Amino acid sequence: MKLQFLAVFMLLTSLGFSQERGNKGKAYAFWGYNRAWFSHSDISFSGDNYNFLLENVHAKDRQSDICIKYLKPDNLTLPQTNIRLGYFIDDHFSIGLNVDHMKYVVQPEQTVLMSGNINTGGPFDGSYQKTDRVISEDFLKFEHTDGLNYINTEIKYHGKIANIIPGKISLEGFAGSGLGVMFPKTNSTLMGGERADKFHVAGGGVHLTTGLNLIFFEHLTLQAEVKSGYIRMWDILTTNNDSDRAQQSILFVEPVYLIGYQFYLKK
């Protein structure tokens, strides 16, 4: 009995006094998935013989069913995915490079207010002043579905919340901010024109982020975060005609769930 008590005491003592290395010099890599919610947006369209504004346009993300086919390398970006790469410059601050692959789909058949002029010789010619316009398929299809790609860098502050099992399982919180460029592949058809569907640097964005990391044995990590921000795109491709462009601003909220690995670059 005394030997059993001594063994338990020694185990608890070793756990209580186990020393963990700090974060400084640690790198990380994460992969995960997101949801996204977008504010209503005013979208302006301009080109040869037309210039008009659609007000208060509603859009949603596009979720994909959970499927094992997305584990294939060719299919990794079909759902709404996220990449996180970073490095701890000290025990509390990290710098990171991220790719947020969201999807943005203007909902068809909604009615919006339209202002401006169209003089292309087609069925939509006219002058409009806050006129009701149904976003029908023959008038407009507008999606950033491959996707609304936000390539960004950020700095985050990390703080330990709890050593759940010292040296084995810990909980960490973080908060930060960042900025980046918008690199969407916009799937768009406008007034019966030829479809646009190619990657293009269209604007920029800024964001705030906060979340939690559940860390196992100082390396394997489950991360949950919420990112919110502002996107401004002033050079969106709408057709294959170089003169056709759109502009819009969007507020977004993006919950993200990731799995990753942390490791020391320095011994």
Image (cartoon, helix red, strand yellow):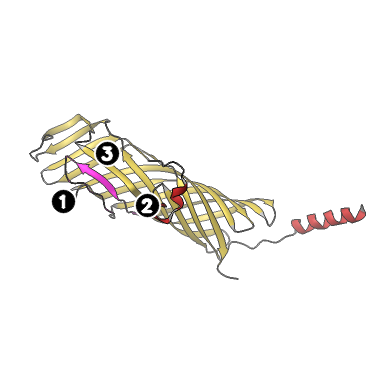
The residue pinned by badge 3 equals: 42
Which residue sits at x=37%, y=52%? 150
Q: Which of 224 and 21 is in front in this view?
A: 224
Q: Give the Cα separation between the discs numbered 1 and 3.
A: 20 Å
Kindly report which numbered mark, 1 or 3, lies closer to the viewer in this rendering. Answer: 1
Q: What element carries label 2?
A: strand
Kindly report which numbered mark, 3 or 2, lies closer to the viewer in this rendering. Answer: 2
Residue type beneath disc 1: Ser
- Identify the mark nearer the N-term, 3 or 2: 3
The residue pinned by badge 1 equals: 243
Q: Which of 70 and 256 is in front in this view?
A: 70
Do the CB atoms of the residues marked 3 and 2 lie less than 8 Å apart?
Answer: no
Residue 230 is situated, as x and y percent measured from the top left of the image, at 37, 46
Q: Is residue 122 above or below residue 264?
A: above
Q: Give the Cα separation between the discs numbered 3 and 2.
A: 20 Å
For the magenta stretch, what is the residue range?
A: 181-198
| Membership of 182 in magenta stretch | yes
Residue type beneath disc 3: Asp
User: What's the magenta bit mostly, secondary-structure-wise?
Assistant: loop
The residue pinned by badge 2 equals: 150
- Identify the mark nearer the N-term, 2 or 1: 2
